[in-house]
Every structure is written in C-alpha cells, then in structure tokens.
Amino acid sequence: MITTNVLLWSFSKTAQYNQALMERNEEEANRSSEKILVSDLTYNVEEGQVHLEGIVTNESPVPVQITTLWVLHKATEKHGFNDMVDINLKAGDSLNFTGANALTVEVEGLEADNSSNAFASWFVTARGNLIPLEEEREWVQYNYTTINITEPSGGNPKVIIGSLMLDLETFRYFPYASFNQLLNYPGGIRGYNVPASTDMAFGCMVTNVDPANRSIVLDSHSLLWFTLPVSDVPHNRWWYTVDVADDGTISTRYSDVVLAHGETKLIVFASADDTGSSSFSRQNTPKGGVSVSVFLLFHGTIGGDPWGQNIPFVSVYIR
C-alpha cells in the first residue's frame, strides 16, 4: 500500500509537471506568434504631449492584448509611457486610433510644432512582447493642399525618397543639333534604350516634395552617373547638369536651379565637366551591348542649409 501510494503521488506530480510544461510551451508559442503591424502612423506634438494616430492590425493567428505605449524623443532621449492602453485584437482584426481615438503619451519638455522632433515608439503586449510602431519617424507637417504626394497626377510611377520626387516615365535623352544645341528640346526621346558611342544629354522631371516645405537649390555639382560592367573601361561615365535655353542651347556657364516646394522642373545633364568651374564639354555614351545603372546625384542647399540626395532608380540599355 505504501509503495502504491508513493507511485500514485509520483504519477500525480509528473502529470502536474507535464501539464504546467504544456501550458508554458503553449504560452511561449503564442507569445512567439504575436505579429502586430502599425500603418499610417503620424505624430502630433503639443506642449509636453505626443499624440499618435494610425491603424494597428493583428496579423498573428492568436488574439493579442496591447497594454502599454512607450514614446522616446530621439534628440533629448526624454521618454514617456501610457500604461492605460487597452487594445484587444482577435486574429486579423484592425483598430483605427485616429481623431478622438488617438493615443496620447506625456513626454515632459517637448515643444509644440517643433520640426526637429523625431521619435521612436513601441507597444507592449500582455505577453511581454515589444512591438516597434516604426523604426523611427520625423514629425513634420505635410502640406497636402500644395502637392499630393500619395496620388501622383496622371498615374505615372514616381519615386519619393527624401525631398525630391523623380517621375520615372519622363526620363529622356537628347541628341545634338549642333555642338551646344540639343535636338527636340524639351521633349527629347522618351525611353531606356540609348544609342552607343554617341554624344548625348539626358533629362528628367523632378518635383520638390520636401516635408518641411523648404526650397531646394541645385548647384553645378549635380550629375547623372552611369556605372558600367567591369569589362568596360572606364567603369564610370557622368554628365553634369547644365542650363538650357528655350531653343535647346546649352549655356557655357551654370546658374543654380531653384525649386520651390511643390514645383516641378526638367533637369538636364549634358556636360562631361562641371560648368560651375569649367566650360561645357559634350559627353558620349559607352560602347553598346550593355545595361547600366543610372544614379541621379543632386547637390546644393535646402532651406539655405547644405544638402544632397541620390536617386538610384533608373537603368538604361546601351544598344
């Protein structure tokens, strides 16, 4: 009887241990399965408060409870949290926390409407997971009445990274009518197949979409850059930006191009030398039969401060 009782006690404890282990493994599996997506996130700042708006979606197969929201001010490392958040999402559910439903976190010392404010933020779930809302986002005030950067006009594909937007479908090239006069200016020839070993200029339409509504000035160091396959020598070819008159005549000297916020201009790249310090000289395309990467390297000032941007989203075949 004693032996039987000992065995029954041992079996009971083993069963309890296995049950606890199963529950623990299930909880760990559920914790690992949590996947939360936050989209359309914006920050609005008042004195000592950060208001967050966006959409949170539970993309995991298990229900998720969000209990806390943390916000960190990058510049000063001041932070705050709201532990009164109570968001419960079933698998596949979404919640829109905008307007009156915006989430608020107290962060002492923040100034209202300060464009230098940049934040990192994250949710904490009831299972203890930290869910970054975004890696990092700068708080700015977009002016949607001036330029709509979410629905480009005409439906043409555009590239929006940084403060300049490139219209991909308006990329063009220009043969020469004479030494310093472009043929078919400003229309040029649309396309991405370019004649080989030919003196050529290139153009593209860019728009100032700076979030802080600042003007951009492009100086003579801005250029279009080909990177060629290693079998070709030299491995790089470049065209500096130039001034072009209405009849397609290229000026011998460069004057800075100014783009106000929301303004779109045709930027032409034609010279083998920087016309800010040298005279204009034509540049020719490389030998044929190769595809090349095209980088647009813009340089100048933004709002009076030094600035530069690279847009690496074009490729060309040299036929």
Image (cartoon, grey):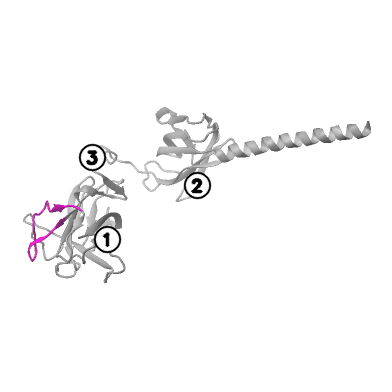
* Quadrant of the drawing holding the N terminus: top right
Residue 17 versus residue 138 in the image, above or below: above
Residue 155 is tagged as 3
At horizontal 19% and vertical 69% (from top left) the residue drawn is 277
Q: Is residue 184 left or right of residue 264?
A: left
Which mark lies nearer to you, 2 or 3? 3
Q: Is residue 66 above or below residue 310?
A: above
State the residue at coordinates (24%, 53%).
216
* Residue under numbered circle 1: 292
Within 10 Å of disc 2 (Cα), the crowding (few <14, some 14-19, many 20+) is some
| Residue at mark 2 to residue at mark 3: CA–CA distance | 42 Å
Q: Quadrant of residue 319?
A: bottom left
Asked whether 191 or 176 is in front, the reply is: 191
Does residue 128 appear anywhere in the picture?
no
Q: Tell me: 6 left or right of 195.
A: right
Q: Which residue is drawn at 40% across and 29% down?
A: 99
Expressed as whole percent of the image width and height from the top left, the position of residue 291 reads 26, 60
For numbered disc 3, what is the local secondary structure? helix
The residue depicted at 12 percent of the width and 53 percent of the height is 188
Q: Which of the two residues, 243 or 235, is positioned nearer the viewer here?
A: 235
Q: Which of 307 and 4 is in front in this view?
A: 4
Q: Measure how far apart labels 3 and 1 are at the Cα level.
A: 26 Å
Task: Answer whether residue 181 is magenta in the image.
Answer: yes
User: What amino acid type should be assigned to the residue bearing mark 1?
Assistant: Val
Q: Upstream in the sequence, badge 2 or badge 3?
A: 2
Mark linked to residue 78: 2
Task: Label 1, secondary structure: give it.
Answer: strand
What type is the residue that disc 2 sits on? Lys
Judged by depth in the image, the label closer to the viewer, 3 or 1, is: 1
Q: Earlier in the sequence, mark 3 or mark 1?
A: 3
| Element under disc 2 | loop
